[in-house]
Image (spheres, rainbow, N blue to C red):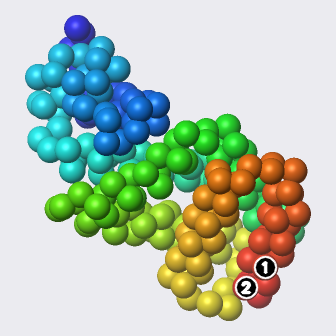
Amino acid sequence: MARMPSAERRRQLTEAAIRAMARDGVAKTTTRSIAAEAGVSLSVFHYCFDSKQALVEAVITTLTDHSVSVVQEALRPKDTLEETVAAGFRAYWDHVRANPEAHMLTYELTQYALREPGFDHLARRQYEVYGEAYAELIEQLRRDMDLELRVPVSVLARYLAAMTDGLTLNYLVLGDAAAWSDILDTVTAHIAGLVR
């Protein structure tokens, strides 16, 4: 096993945990299975993560970062606000359709954290991270497009987090990819209406 910096090893183990949890479920994923998935010894895992809570938090943050980076890349100002917002939603939606297991895992992690004694703060943190990510994206658009919002950034960020959370779960349960073009158009028009 090659030596690597601990931050890089943590990333490797976090990505391995995501693969194992998406495949086997959170409850059935063990530290041993994560170490095996990463191709490292169990002692390396315990050197990098001092608790399962630390691992779950790293997984939640990494999954959120994956989705946010896709949207950030797509949120380049277009000719109109609607086109810009639509590009961000399309990028997110393409990510959901390409990675349904990872998005399913986010819901499983929430339920796991709410049910596991001592982990409930991780579920709260998960949704705080969503709100923070949306707030950063909103601020980026405000700066890049010189926008004035009709509602506070914190309210719009939490609204977007709740709305995309519900839409994502709805898609994971019902599928029906053909219906989502009209739904995303409706959401885009509504969001654009909250901006002057």
- The answer, for residue 6, to whether it is visible in the render is no
Callout 2 crowding tier (Cα within 10 Å): few <14, some 14–19, many ≥20: few
Q: Is residue 114 visible?
A: yes
For this rendering, which residue is in front, 89 or 153?
89
Dot 2 falls on a residue whose secondary structure is loop
Residue at (80, 51) in percent of width and height: 176
Label ID, residue 190: 1
Is 76 above or below relative to 22? below
Amino acid identity at mark 1: His
> Residue 94's image quarter?
top right
* Residue 119 picture location, percent across and down: 23, 60
Residue at 82%, 57% in the rendered image: 180
Image height of 24 relative to 73, above or below: above
Residue type at mark 2? Leu
Instruction: Give the label on residue 194, or none.
Output: 2
Percent coordinates x, y for residue 90 in the rendering: 76, 53
For the C terminus, the image quarter is bottom right
Task: Specify the quadrant of the image occupied by residue 97.
Answer: top right
